[in-house]
Amino acid sequence: MKKVIVLILAFAGLFFSCKKEVVPETEETVVVEDLALEECFMGITKKDTVLLTLNTKDGKFNFGKLSYHLFEKDKNEGEFSGKMKGDTLFADYNFMSEGVSSVREVAFLKKEDTFTEGYGEVVNDSKDKTVFKDKKTLKFDGNIVLKKVDCKK
């Protein structure tokens, strides 16, 4: 009798282990979120260095950091936010220099993997921010050209 029970259990075990389990197929939607991208640019002219970091999301400029290390002058560094208008970045640069917080408008012309800083006549607006008097007269003559570099953490 023991042999019959052992034989039945062995046969049942073999039968159930060979049975394929059917897993219903489910359609899964994968959402790919565009991660924020950081791009860095640097320009060195003689003993002056300018660093620009752009943060973009979904291919659009979000915000950035900018620092000027000019020879024999106080450095200024801060953050900026703005918009690309065509191939030109216009932004408000909030920075600290000599312990004073200031805001000034900046402009950079993008060409391939470079940004060239623009300059022109400036005025103070009603909010004590330095802005370009006429953006149409900005000059991008290459005094400060920032080239794409690897971002250092």
Image (tube, grey):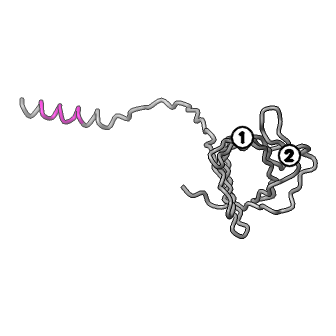
**What numbered label is drawn on residue 81?**
1
Q: Which amino acid does the dot numbered 2 rest on?
A: Val
Tell me the SS state at disc 2: strand
- Residue 10 in the magenta stretch? The answer is yes
Q: Nearer the viewer, residue 92 or 28?
A: 92
Specify start and end residues of the magenta stretch as a single range. Answer: 5-13
Q: Nearer the viewer, residue 92 or 151?
A: 92
Look at mark 2 in the image and give the residue it sits on: 122
Q: Nearer the viewer, mark 1 or mark 2?
A: 2
> Is 92 drawn above or below residue 153 in the view shown?
above
Give how far apart the Cα atoms at labels 1 and 2 are. 19 Å
Residue ID at (89%, 43%): 133
Q: Residue at x 84, y 53 (%)?
A: 119
Is 17 on the left or on the right of 69, as rendered?
Answer: left
On whether residue 63 falls in the magenta region, the answer is: no
Q: Which of the 4 quarters of the picture holds residue 144?
A: bottom right
Q: Quadrant of residue 92?
A: top right
Q: Measuring from the top left, give residue 50's x and y in whole percent.
A: 69, 58
Q: Position of residue 65 (x, y in %)?
A: 66, 48
Give the vertical position of 30 relative to 138 (above or below): above
Query: Quadrant where the N terminus lies?
Result: top left
Count every numbered label the image shows and give the total: 2
Quadrant of the rendered image containing residue 33? top right
At label 1, counting other C-alpha atoms closer than 10 Å, the crowd grade (few under 14, some 14-19, many 20 or more) is: some
Dot label at residue 139: none
Residue 49 visible (yes or no): no
The extreme bottom residue here reads 46
Asked if residue 32 can be seen in this view, the reply is: yes
Quadrant where the image shows the C terminus = bottom right
State left or right for residue 26 relative to residue 34.
left
Kind of residue at disc 1? Ser
